[in-house]
Amino acid sequence: MCNPQRFHVDCPSRKLFDQIADKWSMMILTVLDSGPMRFNAIRRQLEGITQKALTQTLRRLERNGLVEREVIATSPVAVQYSVTELGCQLKGPFKALYKWTVDNLDEVERARAAFDQRIEEEEERLRA
């Protein structure tokens, strides 16, 4: 077990946390929460994701047991993705994180504006 105060490079929890907290994983799992979807349907739901990023993220999610890939024997062959039982366990934490985001967005925006103003003032002082 890793010490939660020190995330070593070889810590298994760090590697899994990296997957869950990456740019696209949480959004992909949330999109798939509505039911199985094909690749392009997922892509249409996630504005800005590239084909490469979606492919890589789905593969990592599948490898970690959070997403299942199913080949459908049609002509042409189709593939659909769905959230596994293990992946569904993230629903509660994701909803809590989303709620926190919505509840605190105004405060975060104020902090960003204050930071940007402070940096701008410091840069002006350095130029003077």
Image (spheres, rainbow, N blue to C red):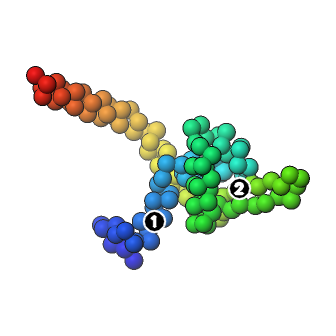
Neighbour tally class for label 2: few under 14, some 14-19, many 20 plus, Cα within 10 Å: many
Residue in the foreground of this view, choosing between 104 and 49: 49
- Residue 26 in sight here: yes
* Residue at the far bottom in the pictured view: 1
Neighbour tally class for label 1: few under 14, some 14-19, many 20 plus, Cα within 10 Å: few
Residue in the foreground of this view, choosing between 71 and 28: 71
Is the residue 113 above or below the residue 39 in the image?
above
Task: Please state the horizontal and vertical placement of residue 113, each as a whole percent of the image.
Answer: 30, 29
Residue beneath disc 2:
81
| Res 124 label | none
Q: Looking at the picture, which amino acid does disc 2 mark?
A: Tyr
Q: Residue at x 22, y 27 (%)?
A: 120
Q: Quadrant of residue 1?
A: bottom left
* Residue at the far top in the pictured view: 128
Q: Looking at the picture, which amino acid does disc 1 mark?
A: Lys
- Residue 87 in sight here: no
Is the residue 100 above or below the residue 25 in the image?
above
Is 6 placed left or right of 126 in the picture? right
Is 125 placed left or right of 90 in the picture? left
* Residue at the far right in the pictured view: 75
Give the structural element (helix, strand or loop) at label 2.
strand
Is 80 placed left or right of 105 in the picture? right
Give the structural element (helix, strand or loop) at label 1.
helix
Task: Please state the horizontal and vertical placement of residue 77, each as a whole percent of the image.
Answer: 83, 55
Residue beneath disc 1:
15
